[in-house]
Image (cartoon, rainbow, N blue to C red):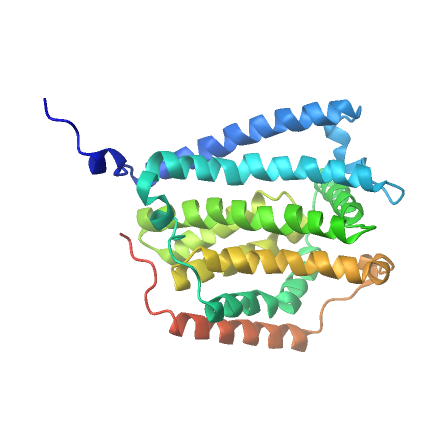
């Protein structure tokens, strides 16, 4: 009896549609498992999951903040990172890093350009955020978003550098790895194969990326951020580039909260006017110029293979 070839056993067999269905099912299953673990942890503190947004306040101890960081870390791990890794090992097998475009490190210059690509966008993104806020939303959306924003504001409060490291882990490291694996590594790459259109895939994923965060006043800015990360992935043919850019984008906000917490907490966001149009236009020009430079210096965009 002829034994099967070891290489044929390890060779992945899947279609883009199978990969998409698999990651969606894995993410849903992971979210349910994570929600169960989170509910158990919250129960130990007598917290109703429906009121999790009001758990933290200005008087919360570092222990309370660390508890909430643990809850959010579990949510990130089980919704994004663990499902993505599990499906990659199951269906991509020995080709997992190559299929996710993680098999090559990003050059230092490309990584820096990716970070600058997002850095230049801050004023323009803030400009779109102001206009997004002018869109009338139902009370339940506004209430949910205000509750989430209050929780995140109190979560970012720190009494030590140790807490800053934890904030970077929860708000920058885990989202950069997990969300980029799921949205760009899986969804965008497989949708591009199905649609044969990288631009359509990028924008579909950007819309889903924004919608899944459930923060409606920031829907347009986050969609644009998702599209920028998508183009970084497409242009560079390397998932490490959007991962690094995503990490620095979130991480800079964590560091800013640490360094300028008192100044930022005294700002009434409702009284802030939109970013000046000329500042927003300059930001957009710099984003387009940096993006063009990245595109020109990466001459091997993703193929359908």
Residue in the picture at 74% in, 61% down: 256
- Residue 280 relative to residue 109: left or right: right
Residue 179 location in percent, x, y?
53, 46
Residue 60 location in percent, x, y?
86, 40
Q: Is residue 285 above or below residue 143?
A: below
Query: Is residue 136 in sight in this rendering?
Result: no
Residue in the picture at 80% in, 37% down: 64
Q: Nearer the viewer, residue 8 or 118?
A: 8
Q: Nearer the viewer, residue 52 or 241?
A: 241
Query: Is residue 23 in sight in this rendering?
Result: yes
Residue 195 location in percent, x, y?
33, 49
Q: Is residue 12 above or below residue 226?
A: above
- Residue 204 relative to residue 210: left or right: left
Q: Residue furthest left?
A: 1
Question: Which image quarter: residue 14?
Answer: top left
Q: Quadrant of the N terminus?
A: top left
Residue in the picture at 76% in, 58% down: 257
Q: Nearer the viewer, residue 160 or 67?
A: 160
Residue 95 location in percent, x, y?
32, 44
Question: Which image quarter: residue 96?
Answer: top left
Residue in the picture at 47% in, 56% down: 240
- Residue 243 relative to residue 281: left or right: left
Could you tell me how many numbered marks the image carries?
0
């Amino acid at each position: 009896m002829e034994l099967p070839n070891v290489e044929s056993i390890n060779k992945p067999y899947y279609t883009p549609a199978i990969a998409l269905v698999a990651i969606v099912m894995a993410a849903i299953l992971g979210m349910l498992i994570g929600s169960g673990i989170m509910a158990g942890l919250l129960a130990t503190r007598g917290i109703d999951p429906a009121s999790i947004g009001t758990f933290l306040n200005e008087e919360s101890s570092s222990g309370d903040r660390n508890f909430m960081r643990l809850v959010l870390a579990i949510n990130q791990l089980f919704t994004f990172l663990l499902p993505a890794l599990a499906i990659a090992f199951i269906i991509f097998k020995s080709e997992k890093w190559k299929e996710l475009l993680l098999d090559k490190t990003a050059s230092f210059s490309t990584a820096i350009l990716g970070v600058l690509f997002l850095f230049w966008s801050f004023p323009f993104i803030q400009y779109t955020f102001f206009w997004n806020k002018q869109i009338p939303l139902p009370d339940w959306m506004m209430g949910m978003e205000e509750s989430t924003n209050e929780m995140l504001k109190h979560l970012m409060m720190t009494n030590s550098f140790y807490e800053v490291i934890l904030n970077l882990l929860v708000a920058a490291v885990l989202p950069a790895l997990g969300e980029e694996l799921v949205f760009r590594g899986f969804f965008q790459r497989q949708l591009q194969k199905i649609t044969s259109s990288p631009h359509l895939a990028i924008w579909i994923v950007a819309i889903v990326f924004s919608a899944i965060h459930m923060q409606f006043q920031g829907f347009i800015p986050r969609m644009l951020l998702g599209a920028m990360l998508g183009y970084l992935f497409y242009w560079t043919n390397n998932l490490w580039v959007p991962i690094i850019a995503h990490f620095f984008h979130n991480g800079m906000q964590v560091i800013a909260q640490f360094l300028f917490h008192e100044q930022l907490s005294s700002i009434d966001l409702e009284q802030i006017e939109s970013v000046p149009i000329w500042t927003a236009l300059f930001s957009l020009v710099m984003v387009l110029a940096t993006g063009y430079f990245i595109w020109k210096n990466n001459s091997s965009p993703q193929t359908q293979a």
